[in-house]
Amino acid sequence: MKILTAFFILVIGIASGSTSAHHSFAAEFDNTKPVQLTGTVTQMKWSNPHAWVFIDVEDESGDVVNWALESISGNVLLRRGWRKADLPVGTVIQIEGWQARNGTPTASAFYVTLSDGRRLFAGAGTAKPATEEQE
């Protein structure tokens, strides 16, 4: 009986650790602060539970800022038509999404538009960016 109890405690501990590492959209991003960015891909991480795209964006003063863009998981991106070859380093892309609440150059990506015009759904967030609602 002690072994069975220890097993259940271990399973619950492992399960709670993975769920606490995940966050809600509203806790980290502000859906009242849409962003539109154009930049050059510096890295793509095909990870779970979220994939990340990193791009260099030139700001108003001419400084280059590296933005971190969170999306849905890499597995889901692949099922939705993304290909690992779509985002090699140096590719210029456009991003529509929402600014991080902490004001850092981090955003939740909703759409990614590739240089060939394909618009891919990145899927994080709860609604379309305000930029699309106005179209």
Image (tube, grey):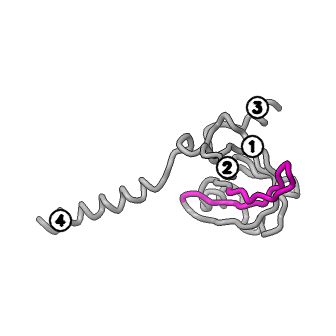
Percent position of residue 30, x then y: 62, 39
Q: Which residue is mark 4?
A: 4
Measured in 3D between alpha carbons, the distance from the residue under mark 2 to the one under mark 3, in whole angstroms, is 19 Å
Percent position of residue 34, x then y: 72, 39
Q: Earlier in the sequence, mark 3 or mark 4?
A: 4
Residue 28 placement, left or right of 109: left
Q: Tell me the mark number nearer the camera, choosing from 2 and 3.
A: 2
Looking at the image, residue 130 lies above or below residue 114 = above
**Dot 2 alpha-carbon crowd within 10 angstroms: few under 14, some 14 to 19, many 20 or more:** many
Query: The magenta stretch spans which residues?
Result: 49-68
**Residue occupying image coordinates x 88% and y 57%:** 116
Q: Which residue is mark 1?
A: 35
Residue 117 placement, left or right of 82: right
Percent position of residue 73, x then y: 59, 58
Q: Quadrant of the N terminus?
A: bottom left
**Dot 1 alpha-carbon crowd within 10 angstroms: few under 14, some 14 to 19, many 20 or more:** some
Q: Are marks 2 and 1 in contact (CB under 8 Å)?
A: yes
Q: Tell me the mark number nearer the camera, choosing from 1 and 3.
A: 1
Q: Which residue is mark 3?
A: 133
25 or 73: nearer the viewer: 25
Residue 63 placement, left or right of 106: right
Q: Earlier in the sequence, mark 2 or mark 1?
A: 1
Q: Tell me the mark number nearer the camera, choosing from 4 and 2.
A: 2
Q: Which residue is mark 2?
A: 107
Q: Amino acid at mark 4?
A: Leu
46 or 24: nearer the viewer: 24
Looking at the image, residue 129 lies above or below residue 79 = above
92 or 76: nearer the viewer: 92
